[in-house]
Amino acid sequence: MIYGQGIDIASLKRIKAAYQKNPKFAAKVLTKGELAVFETLSPKRQIEFLAGRFSAKEAYSKAVGSGIGSQVGFSDLEILNNKQGRPVIVKHPLQNKLRVHLSITHDNEVVVTSVILEKLGGFERLKSYFK
């Protein structure tokens, strides 16, 4: 059963400006594992990676209905690529209760992400978590 859906669009230009103004922006958005990947990328790919993770975490927070900061923070979510290169949310607050379906796409100046949360069971427990 679908628990929630979140979609986010982020401007690569805006993310690049935020990162250039304050390089600590990456450390605020990314986990240690994500930062390790980020540091191996070319400058252009770094911005795409950072924007993709930023947008995906925003989409996740929208799917649970809380928004970033109130109940879910950037560090609560970790997105790494699987063996096939597909981004997967490997760490999130409701790991044992929800399955996450994530899609990230880049096109010129924007990144678009979609998160669908699928309930694994215990709907009442989920409702109480976000009250």
Image: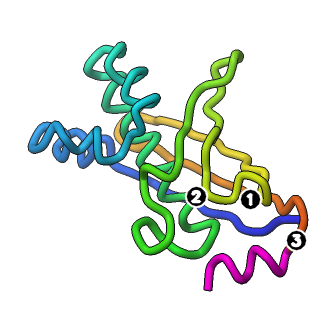
- Residue type at tag 1: Leu
Where on the picture, by quarter, is residue 110?
A: top left
Which mark lies nearer to you, 2 or 3? Answer: 3
* Quadrant location, the N terminus: bottom right
- Residue type at tag 2: Tyr
Q: Secondary structure at mark 2?
A: helix
Picture coordinates of residue 21, whole percent (x, y): 9, 43
- Is 107 placed above or below 69 here? above
Q: Is residue 45 left or right of residue 79?
A: left
Please give the residue where the numbered disc 2 appears in the rendered image. Answer: 60
Please give the residue where the numbered disc 3 appears in the rendered image. Answer: 122
Q: Earlier in the sequence, mark 3 or mark 1?
A: 1
Q: Is residue 118 magenta?
A: no
In this view, the residue in front, 59 or 111, is 59
Q: Earlier in the sequence, mark 1 or mark 2?
A: 2
- Is 36 placed above or below 123 here? above
CA separation in Å, label 3 and label 1: 14 Å
Residue found farthest to the bottom = 131
Please give the range of residues in magenta. 123-131
How packed is label 2: few (under 14 Cα within 10 Å), some, or many (20 or more)? many
Please give the residue where the numbered disc 1 appears in the rendered image. Answer: 117
CA separation in Å, label 1 and label 2: 8 Å
- Residue type at tag 3: Gly
